[in-house]
Image: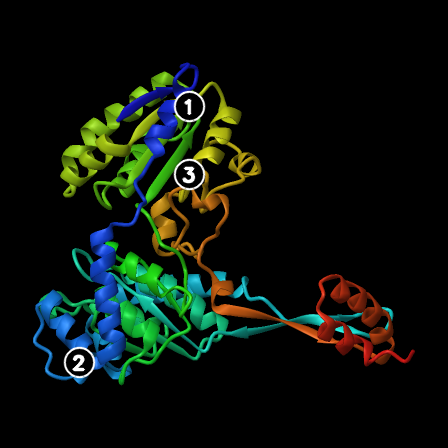
Amino acid sequence: MKKLDTQSPDFQAELKTLLAFETAQNPEIDRIVADICADVQKRGDAALIEYTNRFDGTSAQTIDDLILTQDDLQSAFERLPENIQTALKTAARRVESYHEHQKMESWTYEDEDGTLLGQQITPLDRVGIYVPGGKAAYPSSVIMNAMPAHVAGVKEIIMVVPTPKGERNDIVLAAAFVAGVTKVFTVGGAQAVAALAYGTESVPQVDKITGPGNAFVAAAKRRVFGVVGIDMVAGPSEILVIADGTTPADWVAMDLFSQAEHDEIAQAILIGTSQAYLDEVQTAMNRLIETMPRRAIIEASLGNRGAMILAKDLDEACEIANYISPEHLELSVENPQEWAKKIRHAGAIFMGRYTSESLGDYCAGPNHVLPTSRTARFSSPLGTYDFQKRSSLIQVSEQGAQKLGKTASVLAHGESLTAHARAAEFRLKD
């Protein structure tokens, strides 16, 4: 891992270089995705079947071969060992409970003229969730995307998940059953995103698409945004740990590994206030890496984008954290709630030495779909509110129309919009 010191005159430049990640769109990927999306939009189910067979190595003859029903999901759940069933239900219950607290409620008020103003909250009608299905299975992604939609009151939750070589993962399908998914299509890639966005003879058009995927999925989500809503275009996973030296070095080392093992471009950073402690963590990492099944990925990730930063104190560490705006921030310090008040930008803040980031990934309750690549400066975790809409309510009283009409008339004439002005003026008594 790179070693940085805030007292170095080159620190800011070094930090900026460390955080740099090429987010530019790949023109070749965009071209391929554009063609796929256009073809699915034109040929519907036929194109979806063709691309699924080509890219996933399946042999579907009709769209029915790619559809799973509630009975299929329940059967997958029932095939699992009891301990996995219990874990899925526990995680879903905790995620549901947390997201219940996020529900927005409608409200109204009347001003002094009797004019009613307010906001009406309604759920989206239908959403699509994309669940990766290539190198690994992610039942947690199913729960984190479907459960807030369920809590928001979305009537239909359509899940798409690729099944390379036709292999269906029971844990993923069981998670869909537990989280209230309506129907599953075993398709992936840009073709799945296009089917959700435009609709086909069998895949219903959704209002919003959420969930992570590869570069082709990300490009497809960018392309269909506007036709449907999307959650975000996520970058590589990130963790930043601020440690004051009171947490066992092995714990911190494994927390850094927990993000580095995602892929070679994930980022793990440790900020400490003691060089001796940073050295202790490095020693622990050198020892523990021998036990990691995904050692090659971890070493590549830490070598490419990992770093240990020596800060002069925790105040400086928090300011660096605000600049980094990490997806996951661990405050592995004494009095973490006090230090959390100094954090302005982070996807999720894990407070205290017992709060490993991995608990948030699976079962703590808050959503693990989080802003990456410094976008926590202006965006938030996926939540119930992402599956609800706000409509403004305006009911102007006769008395209110006299006052508001005059104001609107003046402003409309100022914009040379005569019909706007007269629409307000017709309701004036004098």
Circle 3 Cα neighbour tier, 10 Å, few/some/many (<14 / 14–19 / ≥20): many
Structure colour scheme: rainbow
Nearest to the observer: residue 362 or residue 343: 343
Mark identifier at residue 46: 2
Q: Position of residue 25 (x, y in %)?
A: 29, 49
Foreground tag (1 vs 2): 2
Q: Earlier in the sequence, mark 1 or mark 2?
A: 1
In the depicted structure, whether residue 390 falls above or below residue 314: below
Q: Which mark is residue 12?
A: 1
Other-residue count near label 1 (Cα within 10 Å), few / some / many at <14 / 14–19 / ≥20: some
Q: Are circles 1 and 2 on residues that touch, CB within 8 Å? A: no
- Residue 410 location (% of width, % of height): 81, 64
The CA distance from mark 1 to mark 3 is 22 Å
Q: Amino acid at mark 1?
A: Gln
Residue 280 is at least partly visible in this image: yes
Q: CA distance from mark 1 to mark 2?
A: 53 Å
Q: Determine whether the residue tagged by mark 2 lies in a helix, strand or loop.
A: helix
* SS of the residue under disc 1: helix
Instruction: Report whether 430 appears left or right of 86.
Output: right
Q: Nearer the viewer, residue 304 or 353?
A: 304
Any mark on residue 330, and which? 3
